[in-house]
Amino acid sequence: MTTKKQHLFSNKEVLRKIQEAEKSPEKQAILRSVKEEMSLNRSKNQTQLLLLVFVVFILMAFFKILGFVLGMVLLIFSGNWYQKRNKKNHISYVDYFLLPVLREILPNIEIDYEGGIEEAIFDLVTPSAGTYQPNCHILFKDEYNTEFCNLYSYHTNQDSEGNTTVIEDFKGQVLMAKYATGLVGHVRIVPTSRGFFGREFQVGYKKAENGEKKIETEDIHFNETFNVYGTDEVSSRTLLNPYLLTVLSEYREKYPVTIWMDENKVSVSFYTGYQILQAPSCRKDIENLSLSTEYEKVQDSLSDFYDLLDTINTQL
């Protein structure tokens, strides 16, 4: 696998085509109608929330416990309406803004906005967690069979007094590609750091297990920021060339990156601390929606992740 695909997200001709299509009166009318509906859904949710707070306050003031129970029932029902309107906005965002832009890049691309990559992959490339919440699942339908999703994961702790604390384990992006890599066994590259007196901190990621052996490289800086575990050292070292080590070190300066590879797939996670390609949630963001701005978001964010996956693919 040696094809370079990094130009996909930086093609100026694609941006020009999107801008030209967006200028047509027909397209403008459609997008304006969609944005008006999205704004209306948001306004309905805000009005519903204010009315709900007022009604629950009145019920509790006059009926005490019974009022509280009735308020909870209202909260459940209104929550369903709230979620339905949010889902409608997500569908509108995907169908009229995100998907048309991405299909200018890869025509067969598909999006499941509420879904994610299979959970088993999260276990391989993100810190251990209790709950995984993926979104914006994109199937590229390219030669790598690439998949992408945002991911937020967490676990909860309970103290002696029964107070529960939510602890974030991961917030970022995950990519996976499926093809014959030529590797024997598997290799796992996880971020680490050094504290006082060179003490190592590999928080949330497992040490060597399942027949793995820790592999040191000749790059001292890389060894201080990443740990490599593989089941076949000879095969793993075919991947760990100076170029890839340098690229990974450059990414590590921006955010933690984790890689897991075996004979038929490559998985990469980026602990960026944020999520990308999110449906707008406020009126101003809805009003500013356009095809060209969404394409620019894809260029600024998704391309950076895809480029690293492509770089790994070219090393095999």
Image (cartoon, rainbow, N blue to C red):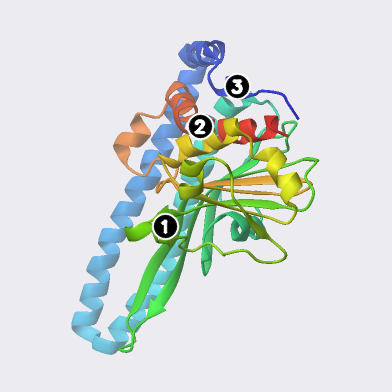
Is residue 229 at all visible to an observer of this figure?
yes
Residue in the foreground of this view, choosing between 295 and 204: 204
Question: What is the C-alpha distance between the residues marked 2 and 1?
Answer: 34 Å
Question: In which image quadrant can residue 143 be found?
Answer: top right
Image height of 184 relative to 29, above or below: below
Residue in the foreground of this view, choosing between 246 and 153: 246
- The residue tagged 2 is 304
Q: Give the class, few, some or many, for how many residues have Cα within 10 Å of label 1's Cα (few <14, many ≥20).
A: some
Under circle 1, the secondary element is helix
Kind of residue sitting beneath label 3 = Leu
Q: Position of residue 304 (x, y in %)?
A: 50, 32
Instruction: Please tell me whether mark 1 or mark 3 is closer to you in this view.
Output: 3
| Residue visible at 60% across and 22% down in the picture | 8
Q: Earlier in the sequence, mark 2 or mark 1?
A: 1
Q: Is residue 261 left or right of residue 250?
A: right
Instruction: Please tell me whether mark 2 or mark 1 is closer to you in this view.
Output: 2
